[in-house]
Image: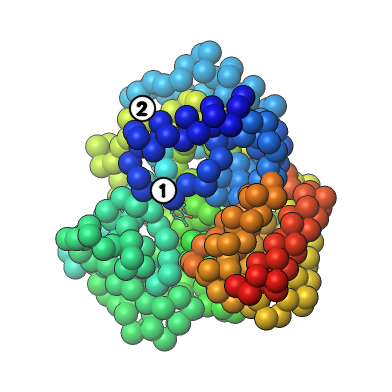
Amino acid sequence: MSQIYASEIMAKDDAGYLPVFSRYSIVLDHGEGAYVYDVNGRRYLDALGGIAVNVLGHNDPALVDAVAAQAGHLIHVSNLYYTAAQAEAADQLSRLTNGGKVFFGNSGAEANEGAIKAARKYGHTISADKVQIVTARGSFHGRTLAALTATGQEKFHKGFEPLPQGFDYVDFNDIHALERVVGESTAAVMLEPIQGEGGVRMPAEGYLRRVRELCDAYDALLVFDEIQTGIGRTGTFYAYEQYGVTPDIVTLAKGLAGGVPIGAFVVTEKVAQVFHPGDHGSTFGGNPLACAAANVVLDTVTRESFLAHVREVGGYFKQELAALKEKYPKYVSDVRGAGLMLGMEMHSAAAAAEIVRATLAHGVIVNCTAGSVLRFVPPLIFTNENVDEVIRVLDACILDICDTGGL
Ligand SMILES: *Cc1c(COP(=O)(O)O)cnc(C)c1O
């Protein structure tokens, strides 16, 4: 494959595809484990994992076999009929979520739409006014209209008004702000336990527990958006397990089927009871192809040895990032995160953007979010050796761009 071939693909895509992504100039072709390869055969270490999606890495044999086998049986049937793949996925996910009831959609935004609908429907059984959804500033919940409105960042709202009604925003980690807003009219408080797109923001000590108590006091539902933090990402299947807090509704997507599009929301029995045939639905949601993939992921990531691996490699990664902070106190302002969801905040957004470009040129894919936060959400099969490669390249790029380059 020649360079000319890559530029032809990019030109074709630019001509045909809606320009909503500012893309980097590489054309990816295939992958193996923690690495992806472009059409010229150049190898890149993937510390982004398709944004927390490719939890088993690329070309995982069990995942590929399951998808291929299922495709040869049935790719899709209507939800008017049962399939073994969906039954298995729903059963597994229900067991992992305190016996809750599962609904499958196709994306994170769709999972959150479902959660918002569930909260509203539950609220309406108590009072016609119990409809408000409270979310956090800096949150990210997706791009469909209600999920977009739930997203507490104005830059995502601009130009799409009028937005759906009934959303209130509070600062993340400010329990007093939440106390002022939550009341009888609150249907739900919806939070990411750790904010992802918002810059890998950790919950303050005791915050999520206080949120749970506040929800209980007003019979408001607690919704955790674990689309990014779930599926073992933080070292436990759900991040909320580490905070001793259980939600009424949890949403999943990203890593759930290892890269095959899927989303899910899981509700407790009391919420499930407000749903009846016809109240919600999806044509593609829970199709056997996506569910067969999800079953492989769930079988794998729930093994204690797998989660222990995430904690160990994540701990090592965080320690090595902290060492970079020690080495470059002028340029690295913070390191935070849990498991393999890590953020390194740089002193400037310009430097962070330049570092992302430079690491890519050195064959390492990292990402920058919330302006100045380098984000690492690699495949969960990442090893300490993979971490060493990321750190070595980051070190060289920080030296080059910040120290020598003056950015
Ligand atoms: C990615 C993400 C979403 C949106 O998921 P899509 O599949 O892109 O719709 C929602 N919430 C969180 C926390 C996310 O990280």
Looking at the image, residue 268 sits to the left or right of residue 403; the answer is left
Based on the displayed image, in which of its 4 quarters is residue 346 positioned? bottom right
Q: What is the x, y in percent for residue 328?
A: 73, 76
Residue for badge 2: 79
Based on the displayed image, in which of its 4 quarters is residue 16 positioned? top left
| Earlier sequence position, callout 2 versus callout 1 | 1
For the residue pair 244 and 4, the one nearer the viewer reads as 4
For the residue pair 135 and 28, the one nearer the viewer reads as 28
For label 1, count other residues whose C-alpha is less than 10 Å away and answer few (under 14), some (14-19) or many (20+).
Answer: few
- Image point (40%, 57%), residue name: 141
Q: What is the x, y in percent for residue 279?
A: 25, 42
Looking at the image, residue 126 sits to the left or right of residue 266; the answer is left
Residue 295 in view, yes or no: no
Residue for badge 1: 21
- Helix, strand or loop at mark 2: loop
Q: What is the x, y in percent for residue 332?
A: 66, 75
Label 1 beta carbon within 8 A of ligand 1: no
Amino acid type at mark 1: Phe
How far apart are labels 2 and 1 at the CA level?
33 Å
Question: Vertical placement of 393 versus 106: above or below?
Answer: below
For the residue pair 406 and 350, the one nearer the viewer reads as 406
Amino acid type at mark 2: Asn
Question: Vertical placement of 263 versus 225: above or below?
Answer: above
Label 2 beta carbon within 8 A of ligand 1: no
- Helix, strand or loop at mark 1: loop
Based on the displayed image, in which of its 4 quarters is residue 17 positioned? top left
Q: Residue furthest top?
A: 72
- Image point (37%, 30%), residue name: 284
Question: Vertical placement of 141 versus 44: above or below?
Answer: below
Residue 311: which numbered mark, if any?
none
Q: Where the N terminus falls, by quadrant?
A: top right
Please tell me whether mark 2 or mark 1 is closer to you in this view.
1
